[in-house]
Image (spheres, rainbow, N blue to C red):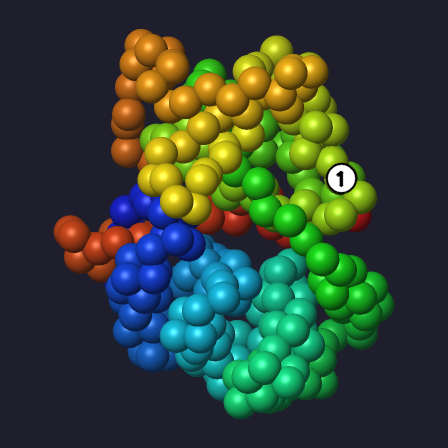
Amino acid sequence: MKYQTEDMNVNDVLKNDLNAAITLKKYKKLTQNIKNHPSLLKDKTVILCAATFLDSSERNIVKLCLDIIEDFVQNDSCHYALITTFGIFESLESLSIRLRGHDDAQANRAAVMVDILRKNTPPAYSTRLRVKGRQARKTTTMYQLYIPQLTNENRQDIEEALIQIKGVVSFVIDLDRQKCTVRVTPNLAVESLVRALSEKYLLKILVVSKNPEDVSEAYVDVLNKNNKSLHADYFPEEESPPKGKSVSHFTNITKNANGWIKSAANFWNKSFYW
């Protein structure tokens, strides 16, 4: 059986608890059926979505993410895929540490899953988990980049460039909105990230800035010494490419489903640098 998820701006999901909850509940229904596990893990969208949203500050979102991951962990045949997909084990371990003393129930759930996966880790991955586990505990920062010239043609080049930049932990590309959400380690300055991408592909890359008291966005040119902010309406509409539908990996979950595509899924298991 195949399913479809529709593309959604990840930042919108992160800031909108209702959207996130709706999306995760739909995914949870899929993971509750063990017959769906092989196709879901092959695609990786659902499991990477759950792993990413473990960073949420909302308890109900974290609980839904743990419910989804737990469905996979309880299926022994899923262990290898969970262990060998970078980000799953690391996110669980990071959460189990972060929630200690704040939400012991969820911290313990994450710790139990970490223990199960660790005990079932193939010898070849033991070292990787130890090293990456320590790295996952480092503080990371999330930035959203606006790339006016982002198209389906140069998307893969940008993805491959991102995984080569030291300090990039993970990223999500939203082709429709010409945005890229990037999680980086403390030793990678956003200026260095933007410079590395813009100089290689001669692209204009701006950092999205949001005022908590204002729903509008501003775009900051961090390579400009004056650090000039440009509001969204500054960019003429013709600069944006036609808004085509992003590639979806599932079909027929529901026509009105709220979802998002982890565009980095195909690159997740390549060499990440810290």
Residue 83 lies, with reference to residue 270, above or below; the image says below
Instruction: Work out which residue is located at the far front of the displayed protein and give it.
Output: 213
Q: Please, is residue 129 above or below residue 197 in the view?
A: below
Residue placed most toward the observer, 158 or 77: 158
Name the side, left or right, on which 116 lies relative to 75. right
Instruction: In the displayed orientation, state which residue is furthest to the left.
Output: 255
Element type where label 1 sits in the image: loop
Q: Is residue 106 left or right of residue 239?
A: right
Task: Tell me what residue is drawn at x 32 percent, y 78 percent.
Answer: 33
Residue toward you, 187 or 35 = 187
Please give the residue where the numbered disc 1 appears in the rendered image.
188
Could you say which quadrant of the image residue 177 lies in? top left
Q: How many marks?
A: 1
Above or below: residue 274 compared with residue 117? above
Asked whether residue 23 is in view, the answer is no
Q: Please, what is the three-letter code of the amino acid marked with disc 1? A: Leu
Residue at coordinates 64% horizontally, 59% vertically from top-left? 86
Taking 104 as reference, is 61 left or right?
left
Q: Which quadrant: the N terminus?
A: bottom left
Label 1 Cα neighbours within 10 Å, binned few <14 / some 14-19 / many ≥20: some
- Tell me residue 128's x, y (percent): 79, 64
Please indicate whether residue 182 sits to the left or right of residue 225 in the image. left
Give the vertical position of 150 relative to 253 (above or below): above
Q: Quadrant of residue 25?
A: bottom left
Q: Where does the image place residue 183, in percent across and percent down from the top left?
A: 62, 47
Residue 250 in picture, x, y percent from top left: 31, 52
Residue occupying the point 33% across, 19% down: 233
Q: Residue 214's x, y, as percent? A: 37, 40
